[in-house]
Amino acid sequence: MRAAYACHCGECKKQSASAFSMSIAIPFGQLNVTGSVKTYETRAFSGKRKQACFCEICGSRLWHRTPDTDDQITLKVGTLDDASGFSPRGHLWVSKKQPWIVIPEGVPAFETQPEDVQAWRESLGQE
């Protein structure tokens, strides 16, 4: 099973309507879409293109990606039929987390976005 992580940034909190969002990274080529998807493209703070992909019917965000630099997508765990086996094995943007969220000792956590995304994924057991 892929390792899930929690992101506490403002954008993830807004798009999930919660205190954080949970995601898993998977290679884009492993994605099998059976319905229609709408894509919204913007620029990240870094200037890179980023795409948010939504269900055309209900509008839920399904995944996002940075197509210019990464072949991975960030799939939203809440969109899975059974997400019961996932718990966060890492945390991003803890500088923006709610004060009542306690991150367990020994769990990888970054104040903002990790500079070395590959090292981050490896720390979660993903490549």
Image (cartoon, rainbow, N blue to C red):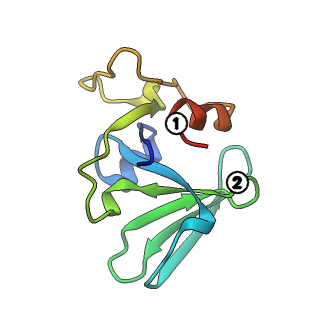
Density class for disc 2 (Cα within 10 Å; few <14, some 14-19, many ≥20) is few
The one of 78 and 47 positioned closer to us in this rendering: 78
Residue displayed at 51% across by 23% down = 111
Q: How far apart are the two marked residues, 1 and 2, measured between alpha carbons?
A: 18 Å
Query: In the image, is residue 39 above or below residue 80?
Result: below
Q: Is residue 85 left or right of residue 107?
A: left
The one of 1 and 37 positioned closer to us in this rendering: 1
Q: Earlier in the sequence, mark 1 or mark 2?
A: 2
Residue displayed at 70% across by 54% down = 70
Residue 122 percent across, percent down from the top left: 59, 34
Residue 53 percent across, percent down from the top left: 51, 69
Asked if residue 41 can be seen in this view, the reply is no
Amino acid type at image mark 1: Gly
The one of 51 and 89 positioned closer to us in this rendering: 89
Density class for disc 1 (Cα within 10 Å; few <14, some 14-19, many ≥20) is few
Residue 82 percent across, percent down from the top left: 26, 60
Q: Which residue is mark 1?
A: 125
In the figure, residue 5 lies in which quadrant? Answer: top left
Amino acid type at image mark 2: Asp
Of badges 1 and 2, nearer the viewer stands: 1
Q: Which residue is mark 2?
A: 70
Asked if residue 95 can be seen in this view, the reply is yes
Query: In the image, is residue 60 above or below residue 21?
Result: below
Q: Quadrant of the C terminus?
A: top right
Q: Is residue 14 left or right of residue 45?
A: left
